[in-house]
Image (cartoon, helix red, strand yellow):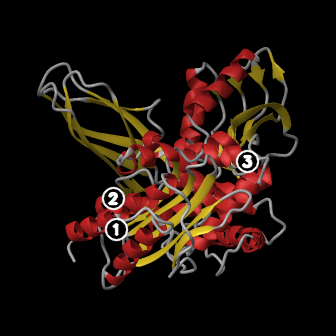
């Protein structure tokens, strides 16, 4: 059946009738049609609060690939373990006295694995050190691989990025990584049409990285058409930028995965201190542990976990999700997790008693917190159990809910489309993948007509017989079957 015919059929079902099955029956009919097309579907919609019950479900216990909906599990466990006001804290230590502006020893930076350590924070640390009188370090600058260190690559996309990448989503992991494991650049048009555009690293060249700029300035009003890639090697990397940028166009930020996150971090720390007028006489290097005799000089606190989760869920930041998964594994009493899959399995084991209490079945499977692993498995019932558990958490539910933006405020255009009820009364996390089959998942909360809240989860996976589908068409279908739950009276339960 062609997509246009399918969408038309769904719309007719959604418009039919106003009785007790007005919302549930169209949903069941539409999802049944998708299933007949060869797609695999799992869905459930529930009301929350006193008297909460299942409003509709379709193969709700079928375990499918959840893609980025996996991040919801990371968010819930992080809030449960740390609390919304938790902050990752850098320790700045020294191995000698500071005399007349000269540190007679090493300057030591201990990063516990903060997933959101960025240029601005490093600049604040350098500024604080300068205010406290530091002008010169006679010893080395040491970045300590505290936290989870530099885990071996176990995820295909991240392994590829160690050699080459055209994206930022697959940056390799390290507990001392900065700027989400990426190279940050900015492109600005030249003064005249046909002139080379200006492309530079932000805030400066991060170590042995070459820049190949082939961006030209195009006619005013032609917009920006840019691509960025990196080619890594043991000695460094080359970042290539291609395309055109209209004369008069505002500067455009660009990001691409760094193949050497530790070396990039070392270069950013060294360069920032130097720019603040602090001279490092020794060799800047990475250490596995603090040197003997190191003493605390001062601390630097990061953003709250609430802010971190907003970045992770609203922007679907894979780097934050996987680094946070590794951080969480260090706080359990289970055996130390050396890899991301091990840390993800530990997360699933820790979550399971709570999820089972709220009706999850069968057991979830996590191989990454980001959802980049197609081996992750979750059903709609599992996700509803998580959303129920979060709703019952009176301490941290506001932070969890606030990290799920209404579609009208989403950074993703495919979510911003649709009627006002969808854009303003739903609070949504989405998930997509395209290998080995297409995946689209939606989960979150919605405001019911009476003012209460409901929760929903819908997973659509391709199959060998129907591996791909158009995300735009599928989104129209899912919006049509979900919106009635926020616009009419509660239907009776219906199922498949």
Q: Position of residue 289 (x, y in %)?
A: 77, 51
Q: Earlier in the sequence, mark 2 or mark 1?
A: 1
| Circles 3 and 2 in contact, beta carbons < 8 Å | no
Q: Identify the secondary structure beneath mark 3.
A: loop
Q: Is residue 104 left or right of residue 53?
A: right
Residue linked to disc 3: 112
Residue linked to disc 1: 13
Residue linked to disc 2: 476
- Residue 131's disc is none
Real-space Cα separation, disc 1 to disc 3, in angstroms: 53 Å
Q: Earlier in the sequence, mark 3 or mark 2?
A: 3
Q: Is residue 268 left or right of residue 88?
A: left
Q: Position of residue 135 (x, y in %)?
A: 69, 18
Crowd rating for badge 3 (residues with CA inside 10 Å; few <14, some 14–19, many 20+): some
Nearer the viewer's eye, disc 3 or disc 2?
Answer: 2
Q: Position of residue 76 (x, y in %)?
A: 69, 57
Quadrant housing residue 390: bottom right
Image point (74%, 34%), residue name: 301
Nearer the viewer's eye, disc 1 or disc 3?
Answer: 1
Real-space Cα separation, disc 2 to disc 1, in angstroms: 14 Å
């Amino acid at each position: 059946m062609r997509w246009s015919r399918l969408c038309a059929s769904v719309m007719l079902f959604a418009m039919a009738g106003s009785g007790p099955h007005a919302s549930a029956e169209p949903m069941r009919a539409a999802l049944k049609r998708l299933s007949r097309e060869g797609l695999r579907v799992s869905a459930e919609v529930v009301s929350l609060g006193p008297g909460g019950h299942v409003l509709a479900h379709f193969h709700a216990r079928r375990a499918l690939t959840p893609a980025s909906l996996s991040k919801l599990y990371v968010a819930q466990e992080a809030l449960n373990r740390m609390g919304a006001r938790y902050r990752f804290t850098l320790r700045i230590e020294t191995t000698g006295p500071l005399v007349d502006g000269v540190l007679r020893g090493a300057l030591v930076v201990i990063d516990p694995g903060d997933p959101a350590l960025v240029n601005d924070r490093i600049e604040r640390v350098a500024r604080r050190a300068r205010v406290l009188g530091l002008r010169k370090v006679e010893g080395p600058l040491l970045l300590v691989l505290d936290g989870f260190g530099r885990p071996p690559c176990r995820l295909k996309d991240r392994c590829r990025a160690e050699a080459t990448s055209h994206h930022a989503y697959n940056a390799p992991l390290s507990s001392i990584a900065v700027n989400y494991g990426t190279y940050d650049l900015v492109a600005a048009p030249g003064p005249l049409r046909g002139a080379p555009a200006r492309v530079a690293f932000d805030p400066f060249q991060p170590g042995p990285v070459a820049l190949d700029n082939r961006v030209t300035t195009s006619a005013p009003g032609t917009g920006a058409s840019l691509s960025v890639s990196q080619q890594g090697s043991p000695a460094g990397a080359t970042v290539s930028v291609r395309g055109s940028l209209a004369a008069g166009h505002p500067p455009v930020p660009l990001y691409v995965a760094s193949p050497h996150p530790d070396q990039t971090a070392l270069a950013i720390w060294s360069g920032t201190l130097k720019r603040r007028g602090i001279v490092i006489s020794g060799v800047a290097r990475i250490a596995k542990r603090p040197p003997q005799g190191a003493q605390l000089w001062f601390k630097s606190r990061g953003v709250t976990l609430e802010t971190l989760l907003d970045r992770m869920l609203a922007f679907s930041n894979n780097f934050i999700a996987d680094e946070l998964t590794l951080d969480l594994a260090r706080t359990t009493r289970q055996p130390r997790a050396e890899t991301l899959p091990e840390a993800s399995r530990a997360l699933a084991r820790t979550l399971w008693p709570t999820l089972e209490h709220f009706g999850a079945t069968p057991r979830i499977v996590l191989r990454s917190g980001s959802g980049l692993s197609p081996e992750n498995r979750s059903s709609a019932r599992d996700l509803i159990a998580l959303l129920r558990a979060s709703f019952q958490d009176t301490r941290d539910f506001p932070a969890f809910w606030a990290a799920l933006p209404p579609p009208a405020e989403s950074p993703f255009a495919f979510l911003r489309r649709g009627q006002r009820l969808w854009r303003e009364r739903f609070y949504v996390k989405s998930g997509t993948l395209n290998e080995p089959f297409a995946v689209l998942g939606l989960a979150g909360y919605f405001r019911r007509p009476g003012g209460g809240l409901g929760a929903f989860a819908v997973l659509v996976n391709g199959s060998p017989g129907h591996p791909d589908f158009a995300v735009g068409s599928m989104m129209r279908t899912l919006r049509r079957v979900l919106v009635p739950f926020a616009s009419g009276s509660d239907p009776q339960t219906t199922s498949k």
